[in-house]
Image: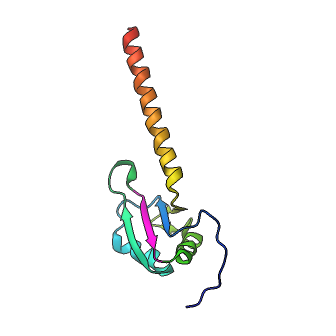
Amino acid sequence: MSRQVIRLPAEVNRILYVRNLPYKITSEEMYDIFGKFGAIRQIRKGTHGDKKGTAFVVYEDIYDAKNAFDNLSGFNVAGRYLIVLYYQPQKMQERQDLEFQRKQIEKLREQQRQQQQ
């Protein structure tokens, strides 16, 4: 299968981050949905807490990942519309850092409230 060389945007990569998945979706169902767009190296589903309903889908080829991204964003699975994003580790780390800082600030506020009483 020959592919025309196309310059892809910087955020495009082989790893998709998928949100809003039905909690009871099976790995086989995910391979059926995402496998239509190319060979998949790995699928990792979130299983606990706020990670439920999310997954990482790793394609063998970046063009297959782009094709899946283009076709599956907003795709309806069991009444839920998929949110498909390119995995961007820097942004995810920044989000985790902000969440950690928010929790630390809340903890300090609570300690200060207790000291004032």
Query: From which residue to which does the magenta span run?
Result: 53-60
Which residue is at 47% across, 62% downward?
18
Q: Nearer the viewer, residue 108 or 84?
A: 108
The secondary structure making up most of the magenta span is: strand
**Quadrant where the C terminus is found in the figure:** top left
Give percent across and percent down for residue 2.
Answer: 59, 90
- Outermost residue to the bottom: 1
Q: Viewed as shown, does residue 85 lie left or right of 43?
A: right
Give percent across and percent down for residue 77.
Answer: 47, 67
State which quadrant residue 57 falls in.
bottom left
Q: Nearer the viewer, residue 20 or 18?
A: 18
Q: Nearer the viewer, residue 77 or 109?
A: 109
- Outermost residue to the top: 117
Q: Can you say whether 97 is above or below 36 in the image?
A: above
**Quadrant where the N terminus is found in the figure:** bottom right
Which residue is at 51% across, 79% downward?
37
- Outermost residue to the right: 7
Per the image, is 25 magenta?
A: no
Q: Can you say whether 17 is above or below 32 in the image?
A: above
